[in-house]
C-alpha cells in the first residue's frame, strides 16, 4: 500500500475516533514524517530515534508527538512499545501559571471565533482540565451554571460561570452545528478531542504572544493562583477543584515574585509599621 493510501486510511480511522479535521491533518503530517524517517519500522528504537529529532522542542510538544504516534501504532495494529513513565514530562519551568492579562490576550485573540472564545472564557472561570472541557455536554449548561465531571476521581460538581461568560457561551451556541451531545464541537459538528483542544490553544497562544511550552494547564494553574492570592484557603481550593489530596493546591499555586517578602513585612509583628 502506498504512503498516501496509508495516511488516507489513517485519517479515516481518526475520524471514527471523533478527532477534528485539524487534528487529523496534524497527526497525519506527524505520521508521514515518522514513516519516512524510520522506513516504516514500528519499533521502540524507531520511536525514540524519531523523538530525538525534536530534541530542541519543548517537552509539551514531544509529549504530543508521542500521543500522535501512539494513535498511529493503534491504527496499524502494532503494540505500543513505550512505557507511560518514559513519555516526556513537563519540567518545572514549563509549569506556567498564566496571568489574568495573558488569559485576556488569549480571549482577545479568539474574538473572531465563537467556539474558541467560549472555550477560553469558560476555562478562565473554571480552570478545568482539557478532558473535563472536552467532555462537557450541552445538557450540562444551564445558564449561568455548568456541570463539571472531574477527570480524576469521577466526582461531579456544578460551577458558576457568571453572566458575562454565559453570554459568550450563548453566542457560541447560536453558531453551533450538528447533533452531538457534547457542548464543544467543530464547525463540522465533530466532538473536540483533548488533542484538538491543544492544537487550538497553540494557535491562539501564538497570536497572543504566549511562549511555546505553555498549554491549557497554564490557565488552570493561573485560576488556582488567582483565587489563592485573592484569599481562598488551600482547603477551599481542594474542594473547588475536586482534588483528593490536600497537597495539590500547594503544587499548583505560584507566588508572584516579591510576594513573600511583602507579606512578611505586612504581617510579622516585629516589622509592622516599619
Image: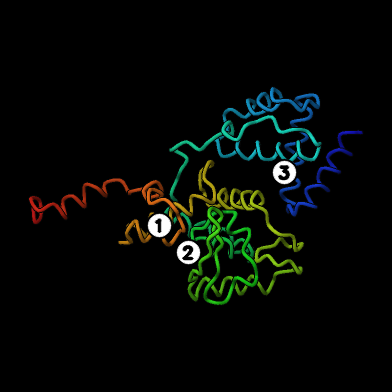
At label 3, counting other C-alpha atoms closer than 10 Å, the crowd grade (few under 14, some 14-19, many 20 or more) is some
| Image side of residue 179 versus residue 129, left or right | right
Q: Earlier in the sequence, mark 3 or mark 1?
A: 3
| Image side of residue 140 versus residue 28, left or right | left
Query: For the residues carrying marks 1 and 2, which lies nearer the camera in this image?
Result: 1
Decide if residue 108 is in sight here. no
**Residue shown at 57% from the left, 51% from the top:** 207
CB-based contact (under 8 Å), mark 1 and mark 2: no
**Residue shown at 73% from the left, 62% from the top:** 187
At label 2, counting other C-alpha atoms closer than 10 Å, the crowd grade (few under 14, some 14-19, many 20 or more) is some
Q: Which SS class for mark 2?
A: helix
Q: Which SS class for mark 1?
A: helix
Please state the horizontal and vertical placement of residue 124, each as a whole percent of the image.
49, 61
Mark 3, residue position: 26
Please state the horizontal and vertical placement of residue 88, each as a whole percent of the image.
56, 33
Please state the horizontal and vertical placement of residue 223, each as a whole percent of the image.
43, 57
**Residue shown at 35% from the left, 58% from the top:** 235
Q: Which SS class for mark 3?
A: helix
Q: Earlier in the sequence, mark 2 or mark 3?
A: 3
Against 245, is 133 above or below? below
Mark 1, residue position: 238
Mark 2, residue position: 125
| Image side of residue 65 versus residue 218, left or right | right
Q: Quadrant of residue 60?
A: top right
Query: For the residues carrying marks 2 and 3, which lies nearer the camera in this image?
Result: 2
Please state the horizontal and vertical placement of residue 94, each as a whole percent of the image.
47, 40
CB-based contact (under 8 Å), mark 2 and mark 3: no
Picture quarter with the N terminus: top right
Amino acid at each position: 500500500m502506498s504512503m498516501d493510501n496509508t495516511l488516507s486510511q489513517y485519517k479515516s480511522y481518526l475520524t471514527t475516533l471523533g478527532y477534528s479535521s485539524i487534528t487529523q491533518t496534524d497527526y497525519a503530517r506527524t505520521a508521514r514524517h515518522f514513516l519516512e524517517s524510520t522506513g516504516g519500522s514500528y519499533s521502540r528504537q524507531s520511536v525514540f530515534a524519531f523523538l530525538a529529532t525534536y530534541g530542541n522542542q519543548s517537552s509539551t510538544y514531544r509529549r504530543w508527538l508521542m500521543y500522535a504516534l501512539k494513535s498511529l501504532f493503534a491504527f496499524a495494529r502494532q503494540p505500543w512499545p513505550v512505557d507511560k513513565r518514559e513519555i516526556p514530562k513537563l519540567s518545572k519551568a514549563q509549569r506556567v501559571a498564566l496571568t489574568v492579562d495573558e488569559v485576556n490576550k488569549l480571549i482577545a485573540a479568539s474574538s473572531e471565533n465563537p467556539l474558541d472564545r467560549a472555550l477560553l472564557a469558560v476555562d478562565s472561570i473554571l480552570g478545568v482540565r482539557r478532558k473535563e472541557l472536552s467532555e462537557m455536554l450541552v445538557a450540562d449548561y444551564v445558564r449561568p451554571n455548568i456541570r463539571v465531571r472531574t477527570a480524576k476521581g469521577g466526582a461531579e460538581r456544578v460551577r458558576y460561570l457568571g453572566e458575562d461568560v454565559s453570554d459568550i457561551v450563548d453566542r457560541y451556541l447560536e453558531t453551533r452545528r450538528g447533533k452531538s451531545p457534547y457542548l464543544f464541537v467543530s464547525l463540522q459538528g465533530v466532538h473536540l478531542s483533548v488533542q484538538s483542544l491543544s492544537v487550538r490553544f497553540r494557535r491562539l497562544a501564538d497570536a497572543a504572544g504566549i511562549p511555546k511550552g505553555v498549554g491549557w494547564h497554564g490557565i488552570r494553574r493561573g485560576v488556582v493562583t488567582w483565587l489563592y492570592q485573592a484569599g481562598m484557603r488551600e482547603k477551599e481550593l481542594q474542594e473547588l477543584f475536586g482534588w483528593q489530596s490536600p497537597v495539590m493546591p500547594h503544587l499548583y499555586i505560584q507566588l508572584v515574585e516579591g510576594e513573600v517578602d511583602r507579606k512578611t513585612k505586612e504581617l510579622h509583628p516585629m516589622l509592622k509599621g516599619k
